Image (cartoon, rainbow, N blue to C red):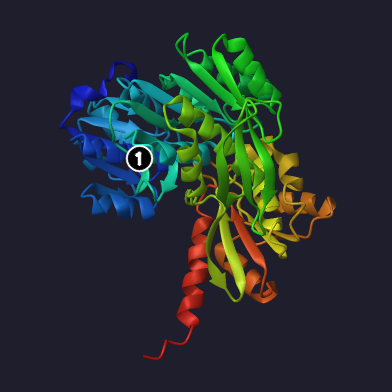
């Protein structure tokens, strides 16, 4: 049914979105609302995204309401929503057309002169946020859709002119194959989403299919240090540009150094020629790489290099990307969206740059991911001093009964990691308040709802503090 749907046939009519609280879906809801569609939607739980959409005047709610969904003219659903979802079933019984989120995004991208799509197993959100900020500062008036929230944008989406559309291109469920890219920025290609891919070769093949969507005069920009990225670009037959901190590559970082928080400063060079100085406010060598990739893309899209370097130096980061959230009992709390072993290992490496005792709090995400990447999860927090593991966040999946966080903890301990099972947020908070020390860095990691633990701890701590004397 979805293949026959054209979103523009529903202009001014009611579009109901199931899973509207997701980072991409909530952004698409804002874009449709701006374009004059009547948008409603539901999600499994309340949260920041639904609150923001309510403030915009959208009729959104937590839970299922099949009767309300059946009053829509078109239903949009995310890949996480089962065909058996009560609202999808009700819409189907009424003959209401349905379209998947990725297909909707691809339709909204058509008609732009340039569509810059940032893809990769991880780093997509930060790299696309960096590129969006640079293009905004350069006066390019981009339309933007990323998978996170950037204060500079006022969220994760922005409706601008028809010159440039910057989009985060997600490989999950091969969603990015619905996009019409003219430029592909590839951050890396690694193992993830093994619930919909056979293995790493299958993942690479999907990236090759994505790059093949480029026009013959399209452009690839990719990480020179990743052999799979290089294979994809070389086999594409398209022009490609490379970036690396040390080279050999087209864009490199000269005089690379890090401050006490792990933030990189360097001279951006293109084929050996100095283009400007960058002093990042976001930590980690991977963010220095994201900045080089975003810079290369921005220059190709018409931004002036030195001004782009200044913009990148002002980039404060997207929410849920190694984000400092507050201090509780002398412990500094951070949160990172990382949800596969490579991302978690990178986040822990950044935490270690501060020279503090690091307590990593892992919320494993989906049973299939934990099973597919089990060995990687056992060692990805090895550089932390202590690891706490919560229950697995099911997301779109049903518990198969053959995998549990206690298996991760046992495996971690066998690897010499000081790991503890703290199934719930209350368990985790209690452990941290009992065993944490002043000066510790507590890093919560996961793309489920583990960020709410930071909020919970901060709220409980603030509530216990004596009121300020006036």
Asked whether residue 403 appears in the rendered view, the answer is no
Q: Residues within 10 Å of mark 1 (few under 14, many from 20)?
A: many
Query: Residue 390 location in percent, x, y?
Result: 62, 56
In the shown orientation, is residue 443 left or right of residue 49? right
Q: Specify the farthest residue to the left.
A: 12
In the shown orientation, is residue 203 left or right of residue 387? left
Relative to 404, say whether 37 is above or below.
Answer: above
Query: Residue 441 location in percent, x, y?
Result: 65, 64
Q: Which residue is painted at 50% across and 23% down in the image?
A: 184
Residue at disc 1, secondary structure: strand
Query: Residue 354 location in percent, x, y?
Result: 68, 61
Query: Residue 308 location in percent, x, y?
Result: 47, 38
Image quadrant of residue 97? top left
> Which quadrant of the rendered structure holds the C terminus?
bottom left
In the shown orientation, is residue 51 left or right of residue 258? left
Q: Specify the farthest residue to the bottom.
A: 469
Q: Which residue is painted at 70% across and 23% down in the image?
A: 227
Residue under label 1: 157
Residues 44 and 453: in front is: 453
Asked whether residue 64 appears in the rendered view, the answer is yes
Relative to 29, say whether 151 is above or below.
Answer: below
Residues 179 and 83: in front is: 179
Residues 317 and 19: in front is: 317
Query: How many numbered marks, from 0 up?
Result: 1
Relative to 68, say whether 197 is above or below.
Answer: above
Residues 201 and 275: in front is: 275
> Which quadrant of the rendered structure holds the N terminus?
top left
């Amino acid at each position: 049914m979805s293949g026959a749907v054209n979103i523009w046939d529903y202009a001014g009519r009611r579009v109901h979105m199931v899973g509207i609280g997701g980072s991409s879906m909530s952004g698409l809801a804002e874009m449709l609302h701006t374009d004059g569609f009547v948008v409603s939607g539901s999600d499994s739980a309340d949260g920041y995204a639904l609150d923001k959409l309510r403030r915009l005047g959208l009729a959104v709610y937590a839970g299922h309401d099949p009767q309300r969904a059946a009053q829509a003219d078109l239903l949009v659903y995310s890949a996480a929503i089962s065909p058996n979802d009560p609202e999808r079933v009700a819409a189907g019984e009424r003959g209401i057309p349905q379209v998947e989120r990725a297909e909707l995004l691809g339709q909204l991208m058509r008609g732009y002169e340039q569509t810059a799509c940032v893809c990769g197993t991880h780093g997509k959100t930060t790299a696309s946020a960096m590129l969006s900020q640079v293009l905004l500062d350069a006066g390019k008036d981009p339309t933007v859709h990323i998978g996170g929230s950037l204060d500079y944008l006022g969220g994760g989406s922005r409706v601008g002119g028809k010159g440039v559309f910057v989009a985060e291109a997600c490989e999950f469920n091969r969603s990015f194959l619905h996009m019409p890219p003219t430029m592909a920025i590839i951050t890396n290609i690694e193992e993830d989403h093994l619930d919909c891919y056979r293995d790493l070769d299958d993942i690479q093949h999907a990236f090759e299919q994505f790059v093949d969507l480029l026009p013959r005069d399209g452009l690839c920009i990719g990480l020179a240090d990743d052999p799979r990225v290089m294979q994809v670009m070389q086999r594409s037959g398209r022009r490609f540009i490379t970036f690396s901190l040390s080279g050999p590559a087209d864009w490199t970082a000269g005089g690379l150094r890090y401050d006490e928080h792990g933030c990189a400063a360097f001279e951006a060079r293109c084929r050996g020629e100095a283009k400007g100085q960058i002093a990042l406010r976001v930590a980690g060598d991977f963010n220095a790489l994201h900045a080089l990739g975003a810079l290369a893309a921005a220059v190709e899209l018409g931004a002036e290099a030195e001004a782009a370097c200044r913009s990148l130096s002002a980039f404060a980061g997207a929410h849920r990307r190694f984000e400092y959230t507050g201090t509780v009992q002398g412990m500094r709390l951070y949160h990172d969206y990382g949800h596969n072993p490579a991302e978690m290992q990178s986040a822990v490496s950044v935490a270690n740059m501060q020279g503090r005792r690091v307590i990593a709090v892992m919320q494993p995400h989906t049973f299939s991911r934990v099973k597919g990447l089990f060995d990687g999860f056992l060692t990805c927090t090895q550089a932390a001093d202590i690891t706490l593991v919560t229950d697995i966040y099911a997301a779109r999946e049903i518990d198969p009964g053959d995998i549990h966080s206690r298996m991760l903890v046992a495996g971690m301990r066998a690897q010499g990691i000081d790991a503890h099972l703290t199934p719930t947020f209350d368990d985790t908070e209690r452990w941290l308040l009992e065993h944490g020390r002043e000066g510790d860095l507590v890093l919560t990691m996961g793309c489920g709802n583990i960020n709410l633990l930071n909020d919970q701890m901060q709220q409980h701590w603030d509530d216990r503090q004596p009121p300020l004397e006036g």
